[in-house]
Each structure stands twice: as C-alpha cells, then as structure tokens.
Amino acid sequence: MNHNTNSQANAISVSNLNFAYNSREILKNISLNFEKNKVTGIFGENGTGKSTLLKILAGVLPAEYGKATEFHNLPQSEVGYLGQQITPAWALKVSALVELGTLTRESWSKEEKQAAVQQAMAETDCLHLAERKVFEISTGELQRALLARVFAGKPKIILADEPTAGLDPRHQLAVMNLLQQHARKGGTVLVVMHDLNAGKTFCDNAVLLNNGEVFAHGLAAEVLSDKNIFDVFGV
C-alpha cells in the first residue's frame, strides 16, 4: 500500500524492526516508510506498541534485531519528541521549560533562541503562562507548554505521542492544525492518536498496528476504513 518508493520522499525508513520487553514481544518485524511533508497517524489498541515505536524512532529506546531508523543523515537536533504524561521534576517557569527545546541549537544566538521560544509559545497559546511555575498550571496548559518546547527547537521531524491529551476541543483543533502546518512547510509529523475521526480529518497517511505488527498502512482514508477498524478494534 506504500504509494511512494522514492527514498528522497521518505523522511524515515524502518525495516525489520523488532522490540521485546522482558522477553515479551512488543513489536514484530516492522517495516515502514514515513513520507516528508505529511502527517502520519499511528493507531491501534492499547498495548499494541504505538508508543514503543515512537520511542524507538525518537532514539529513546534501542531497537533490536534489524536495521533501525534511517533519518537520511538528519542530526538529532532535527527530531522533536513529545512523550506521554511527562511531569517536570523541578519547579521551572513555563518559559524556561519551553527554552529547553532550543538546547540542541548550539549555533543559535541568545536572541534567536528567545525569538524561537516566543514564537512557539504564541503558536501554542501559552505566552500568558510564561512566568508561572510548571506545578501551578493545569494538565492541558502543561501539555501546550511541552508542545511549545518541541516547536521551539524548530525540528524537521516531530514525533508526538497523543499530543491532544488533556486539551479542550478548541486547543485540540489548534494543535492538530499546527502539526498540519508543520508538515505543509516541509516538515514531517508522526502522531500517535486514539481519535479515529480526528485521524481521518488531520492525517494524510496512517499506520494501523495490531498485536505489535503492521495491519495496514497507506492513505489515512483507506487505512481507517470501517472494515479495518472493525477487524482491529471490533467496533
């Protein structure tokens, strides 16, 4: 179902990827290409390996047996990762949390970093939280600040694990629009999602995992068909 064989059109390629945790297989023989300029949604039931796949792509977990990711020589600074349920361990100001996203950009001046932080906070609607401590804000506000941290580093590839978790409908919409814009401007977005309807609306492509294996991948409208959803989710 992969409509694109040109490797230059792919931002990330994975072949024969396996991952086991305490001898329990989580991912089995995953081979996928993720296209540039596209939002790709990753779907599947809980425990099927969606977050694990994203962590391996982000370099947070080591891949086993098999060729891991080819980022086509992209440095780590070009990859932004938003994990799940991150709780900052110390009482940072929100602006300082967002600024952490620029740490990989060693060549940027202080002014460039500050401008990137301001822009990212404006885009994610958390400028008004700049002076607040991260412990003093709501779950949804923290989620937007964490997303701003990813945007602040201006990565080419964004890997986001349920980025709309804890957000009200208005901010959910805004976040998905931002991720779409990022892809349209030449970036690449991989997003783990639960909301199948939002997936059909906002994703160009989709991957459907079932029991740690690729059940279907390709255009979102085809992958998230009623038949596939019934076969995987039973609904």
Image: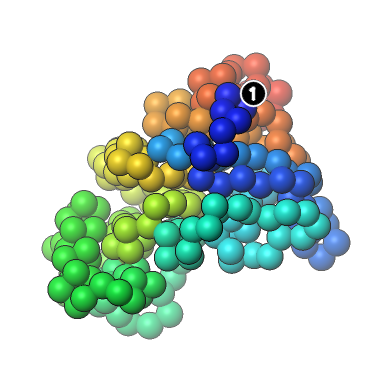
Q: Is residue 32 left or right of residue 22?
A: left
Counting from the top left corner in percent of width and height, residue 151 is at 31, 57
Displayed quadrant of residue 173: top left
Determine whether 166 is above or below 217 in the image: below
Q: Is residue 33 left or right of residue 151?
A: right
> In the rendered image, which quarter contains the N terminus?
top right
- State the residue at coordinates (61%, 45%): 13
**Observer able to see residue 84:** no
- State the residue at coordinates (85%, 61%): 23
- State the residue at coordinates (36%, 60%): 150
Q: Residue furthest right?
A: 23
Q: Nearer the viewer, residue 90 or 74?
A: 74
Q: Which residue is mark 1?
A: 1
Q: Nearer the viewer, residue 138 or 182?
A: 182
**Colour mode of the rendering:** rainbow
Counting from the top left corner in percent of width and height, residue 176 is at 34, 40
Q: Residue furthest bottom?
A: 90
Counting from the top left corner in percent of width and height, residue 43 is at 58, 37
At label 1, the amino acid type is Met
Q: Residues within 10 Å of mark 1 (few under 14, many from 20)?
A: few
Determine whether 146 is above or below 53 in the image: below
Element under disc 1: loop
Determine whether 186 is above or below 135 in the image: above
Counting from the top left corner in percent of width and height, residue 60 is at 59, 66
> In the rendered image, which quarter contains the C terminus?
top right
Displayed quadrant of residue 218: top right
- State the residue at coordinates (26%, 72%): 108
Q: Nearer the viewer, residue 109 or 209?
A: 109
Count the marks: how many?
1
**Observer able to see residue 67:** yes
